[in-house]
Amino acid sequence: MTVRVRLAETLRPHAEGAKVVELDLGGGVTVEAVLDALAEVHPAVGRRVRDETGAQRQHVNVFVGPDNVRDLDGVATVVPAGVEVSILPAVSGG
Amino acid sequence: MRTWTLHATTFLAPDEPAGGTAAPAAPEAPEFFEPPPGVIPDPAPAMTATAGDAVVLVGTTKGLFALTAAPDRRSWNPTGPWFPGEEIAAATLDTRGGRNRLLVGAMSWHFGPSVYTSDDLGGTWREPEPTTLRFPDDTGASVARVWQLVPAADADPDVVWAGVEPAALFRSDDGGHSFELVRELWDHPHRPQWQPGGGGLCLHTIVPDPAGGPRMGVAVSAAGFYRTLDGTTWEAANKGILPPFLPPPEPEFGQCVHKVAQHPTRPDTLFVQHHWGVYRSDDFGGTWQEVGEGKLPSTFGFPVIVDPNDPDTAYVIPLKSDFFRCAAEGKLRVYRTTDGGETWEPSGTGLPDEDAYLSVLRDGFATDGMDPAGLYLGTRTGEVFGSVDGGETWRELARHLPPVLCVKAAVLA
């Protein structure tokens, strides 16, 4: 299936300006698989979402549909067919 | 685990029978909220400068700024910010081999750290792909912040050193495009016992051999000074540096060396600004002697630099105690020694000397290497002061910047 990943505006310069990245993946994929595939296509986006240990950065949120994966199963959350994944900066800052 | 399926919602007209034959129009996908334009500010243009001009890079909590001036350094042109919103703890202008390469260690609170290079004075920036500054998988560590980027000697024009948090040294052999962890230091048996200072457990100072030899030193807060004489074997080199925050006996490591300065023509001599105490070594850290006690208003401070034209002349910025960390007596004063630390005197005029509760961080003080030396300091309250006569007179070069994390100066090749 095709998973659509919507990127925050601040990430788009690292994805050749793409607002949405479409990834061809098998059915029943997890968020982790989506992030792996995204990092392969756009490594500069990948390392902004997860550090080199694979940990999701503290102030970056990943949503499946309207839900923050931190409230679901984290990166093990399954992405249902047709549901968009979005990656957005948290409101934290300084 | 919560699983759910996306359902398109179809609204029937009031008189339309359910299951009617008319195919309902596909609903418009809801518009995704987009912030207003301008989330990413327009990038700053390239700085305007030509060969021989002075360049002062000012890394702040909100991006990188630059000041440039003709060799007389009378009139300064500000440029920036580049990387707006990101913390710039490391920056340098590498002029080896006739190039002018900016190297910047930036840290986004959202998206993490990275190293960027520019070969056109900030007009365009490059982030190395696919390799970049990262810990190898087996370490289980991740880079939190790049604290230091230091070009090696002219003899090694493609070598750049990087110091990061958590405390580690990285080496680049391609001018700063890719980096590799220096394993010998990472595997040092002391490392598991290193304790973080107030800024985190960071390797913040790198002292390469100015002649291109294997000898080099690094400083880690709060582990102290470490050196290698052969380029592979690392040892703690803090003998004589007394930490008032640790019980006796004098520890082999655990000191909080804030900054180390060296003159290229006298590489055995090092000056250290310690958490308390200003120290000098004449055997590249083999032993240290305190040279500030009773001569400076406070021996607490962060930066120390050596005059590029005289290895006996060094500068420090005393702060009132480690609990206050502001300029002593409300007067921002740079203290200067011209005899290797035997005597110290407040340098020149022009710095705020009344109700000035400023502070300068470890990398907030730099010299441009010209003669007479240009000295530049940036404060946590966003001012940049400069002296182009070796500290005789000072003037404000910029104000109202974000808090300054680092100041680096160079002459454009």
Image (tube, coloured by chain):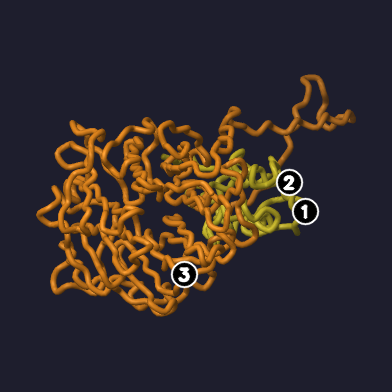
User: Is B286 above or below relative to A82?
Assistant: below
The earlier-in-sequence mark between 1 and 2 is 1
Residue under label 1: A1
Colour assigned to chain B in the rendering is orange
Numbered label attached to residue B273: none
Residue plotted at (38% across, 62% down): B264
For the residues tagged 2 and 3, is the chain the same? Answer: no
Residue under label 3: B212
Which amino acid, mark 3?
Answer: Gly
Colour assigned to chain A in the rendering is yellow
Q: Is residue A53 visible?
A: no
Residue B88: give x, y in percent of width and height.
45, 46
Q: Nearer the viewer, residue B336 or B381?
A: B336
Q: Is residue B374 visible?
A: yes
State if disc 2 and disc 1 touch (CB < 8 Å).
yes
Q: Quadrant of residue B293?
A: bottom left
Residue under label 2: A82
User: Is A68 above or below relative to B35?
Assistant: below
Q: Is residue A16 left or right of residue B47?
A: right
Disc 2: which chain? A
User: Is B411 above or below relative to B402?
Assistant: below
In the rendered image, the quadrant that contains the C terminus of chain A is: top left
Residue plotted at (34% across, 44% down): B375
Q: How many marks?
A: 3
Which amino acid, mark 2?
Answer: Gly
Residue B187: give x, y in percent of width and height.
42, 76
Q: Residues within 10 Å of mark 3 (few under 14, many from 20)?
A: some
